[in-house]
Each structure stands twice: as C-alpha cells, then as structure tokens.
Amino acid sequence: MRASRGARESAAGPAAILRRSAAGGGCGGGRSRMTPGGRCRTESRPQLSLNDDPRLSRYVVVERGPDGTRRLRHTVTWSTLPPDAPEEALRAEFFLAGQEEEALERRLASEPTRIALTLVVTWRCNLRCTHCSVLHRLVRREERGLRPGDFRDFVERWRHRVAPPEGFTLSLVGGEPLLEPDLCSEAVSAVRGGGTARCDITTNLAVILQPAHIELLSRLDAIVVSLDGLEEAHNAQRRPYRDGFDPFRRTWENLERLVAEGLADRIHVQGAVRDPYGTIEHFENYQRALMAIGIRWDRISFGAVHPTVRDPAVQRTFLRTLRDPLPRWQMCCKYRGGRSLTVGPDGGVYSDFYDYERLGSVGDPPEAILERFRALARSMPALRDPTCRACPVLGCCWGGCTNARLLVGDRPSEHCGRESLIRTVRRLAEEGRLPEHGARPRCG
C-alpha cells in the first residue's frame, strides 16, 4: 500500500511563497538532503516576486533563476514567457489582466500530455499494519470485476482517443500487488504496448518470491519497498494476516535476493516509524544495514507516523513551510483533471488512491471520464473561495491537500492566512528560534 497522505502539505500563504528566502532551511539555502556522513546537499530554487506591471494578470509572477535570469511565470497555467514578450504573445498565453477566468478554464479543460495510471491490483494483503491508511478496504477474498484484458483494452482506448503525447506512467499498488503477479505483468505490457512507459510498484515484499515475481520486478523502473525500521520497529506495526511468518525477516531476505538478481539500482526503501523508534540513531543504523546489503543511501527514506512527539502538531509543519516555502504546482490528487487515473480491482475508475471517488468504469469512453474529472476539478474548494481566486499564487498551492484541510476544518484561505501563526513566525525569526527545516530524522 501507499504511505498515508495525511497532512503532508500545507498552504503557506502568498507572502510566504513569494518571499523565497535564500536562507532556506536548517542546512542553508534551497532544499536540503542528508548524506551518510551527516552533511547536507542543497538544491537551488528560483525566487518568485509579484509583478508590478498593470497590464499583466494577477496570476503572473516574476521568476528569477539561480543565475539571475528573469522570466514571467503564470502560476495557474504554469507557462512562461520572457519579460519583454510582445502583447500578442501575452494575450495568447492568458498573461494579460482580465484573462484570469480564461486561464483557469484552460488549466481545467486542457488535454493531458501524460496520464499517470495507478492500478490497485488487489485489496487483498498478507499483512495487517497498525498505521495502514486503507485498512478498512482490505479484504479476505476479492470479487474481481477487472477481468483479464480489461486493463489492456482500457489503455488502448485512452491511447487512441486521447493520445497523450508523453504517454503513460504506471504505479502498481494494493493491498499487496505481488499477490497478483500475472495481472501486474499484464498491466506493464499494456502501458508499454505503444512505446516506453515508466512503471513502478509499492510493495511490502513479504511474499514468498517465485520466478514470476522476479520476472515482473525485473521489468519495472522502480521497486518501492516498505520497511519500517529494523526488526523490532518493523514487526511492532506490521503483522502477518494469517501465516505466522516474521515480516521483517522475509522482507529483508527478499531485498537481499533482489540485490543478488542485479536489481539494486531500482530499489527504493521507505520507512514510517512510531515513537520511540523515530530517532536519528535508529535511522543511522537502519541506513547502514541497508547500505551493507547494497541499497544506495539516497534511495532510503525514513519518516514518522503521526501522532508523534517528534513532529507533534500541524503548526510545526506550518512554521517550516512559512520559513522555506515550496510552490506546489500540482493540484491535490483528487482534482488533477484527467492527468491522474486510478483503476480499482472492481474495474472502476477513481479520482485518486485516497479519496477514491468513482468516475466510471474501465469500459466507459475516455471523453466521459475526462468530463467527470473536469466537473470534479471545478468543484475544488479553492475555486469556490473568493480569497483564493484573488490570490496571485493560487496555482502554487490550489488550496493545499484536501485531507489536511479536512483535518483542520477550515476553508483554504483560512488555512492559509492564520495571522496569529504568521505573527508567531516573525517573533521566532527575530529571536532566532525558528525550527530547523532539516531537523527531522529523514533522508531521501
């Protein structure tokens, strides 16, 4: 299964997004990553600022690159133009004042250039995990509605009617997708039938590997393995469903086998741990153990399961985000307007893996599903909030994560504009006490 979306993303407010400080987070300017030696690498980000040209749409900002070059960025359509672009070019790309509604409609109604397919291969799983976000969907037996060939026919209809120029990507998830290796293999063949397509799988890797599994995994571009720390931490929250096997030992031995099969460069290991295992010491031991069997250090990530004393409240996420804001050009998963499709084992087509709002079935015409997607996107809370619609960086957050907003219980603009929190951030900044962005025990 996938990691829980929860409150992964927070709206930082237009001032924070536009005030892209070179100071960055705890490791220095830009985005930081931890190396095995404890050093931080930084990735430079462009700086954004409001445009002061009355001819231009409020959704147009000035983007300055690390090398000092400037260009105009439309935060809704994500298109760019040079600062000296002629008026006809500005009009054609909806960069002029008064073209805001046209720009929104273009974004919502545009044809997808690439379609990201998520196939929920099965809702059966050989584990029952205490932190599973889809535990309520797991089943003992499945009444399968997705018959052999249905997914291939579905992909072919989309390939010929929509013809996304950049093709497809495919993510295989569950449940535990390796319980159905033949269906997984058929799905990979379907998306690659018209050319290349990036394919990945998210798995607990706690099945008894058969030749069919190895053949499938060798065809994939990425194998994302859930391993929640070392043995004690992993087994504390991952329990076998019926057979009394040791989940950690089986996953670990399978990792060693995949490395021996020459698949190490495709493996990504992710851990989600509860207190008291979420410590730097545990992460370092976890990382060293994985590196010792051939897993690359930069393919290992380690995060906390909420609630946790190490990242105790939504407010702390806000504080980090306000200090080092990151524009989020994609809409929340639920509203991606046909660029992302989830197919379930029942043959249904859904908005996304988490909200799972049904939009039709694999036998429906692509045009009908796209229209339902667009209707769903137009219902986005941010588009029904006057403050959000007037925001110059609406397209940098789209109201944030739907699940996070529902947890907080506010409208998007209320979630974004917490004046008391902003005052707190300013006070902490003056006192030099802002939380360190790189302080969480996380890497990758």
Image (spheres, helix red, strand yellow):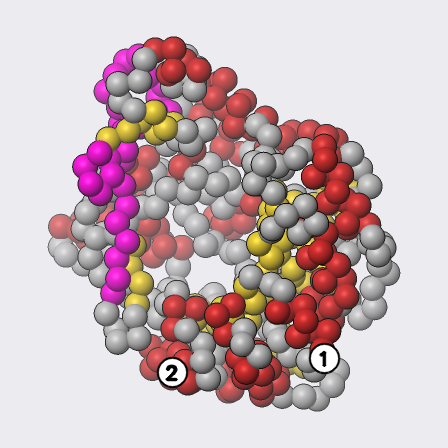
Which element type, helix, strand or loop, lies under badge 1?
loop
Residue 61 painted magenta: yes
- The residue that disc 1 covers is 210
- The residue that disc 2 covers is 288
Place of residue 83 in the rendered image (x, y in percent of width and height, measured from the top left) = 26, 22
User: Relative to 380, is 321 above or below?
Assistant: below
User: Relative to 336, is 317 above or below?
Assistant: below
In the picture, the quarter occupied by the N terminus is bottom right
- Distance in Å between CA atoms under marks 1 and 2: 28 Å
Instruction: Name which quarter of the figure residue 182 lies in.
Output: bottom right
Front residue of this view, candidates 282 and 417: 282
Extreme-left residue of the structure: 431
* Amino acid on which disc 2 is placed: Arg
Is residue 182 visible to the viewer in this orientation of the structure?
Answer: yes
**Classed neighbour count for the residue bearing mark 2: other residues with Cα under 10 Å, few (<14), some (14–19), many (≥20):** some
Place of residue 186 in the rendered image (x, y in percent of width and height, measured from the top left) = 75, 59
Which residues make up the magenta segment?
A: 40-69
Question: Measuring 48% from the left and 41% from the top, which residue is drawn there?
Answer: 330
Task: Decide if residue 189 is on the left or right side of residue 387.
Answer: right
Is residue 437 visible to the viewer in this orientation of the structure?
Answer: no
Question: Measuring 76% from the left and 39% from the top, which residue is drawn there?
Answer: 157
Q: Earlier in the sequence, mark 1 or mark 2?
A: 1
**Classed neighbour count for the residue bearing mark 1: other residues with Cα under 10 Å, few (<14), some (14–19), many (≥20):** few
Place of residue 134 in the rendered image (x, y in percent of width and height, measured from the top left) = 65, 62
* Amino acid on which disc 1 is placed: Gln
Question: Measuring 72% from the left and 62% from the top, which residue is drawn there?
Answer: 185
Mark seen at residue 257: none
Instruction: Name which quarter of the figure residue 260 lies in.
Output: bottom right
Give yes or no for contact between labels 1 and 2 (Cβ–Cβ under 8 Å). no
Residue 153 painted magenta: no
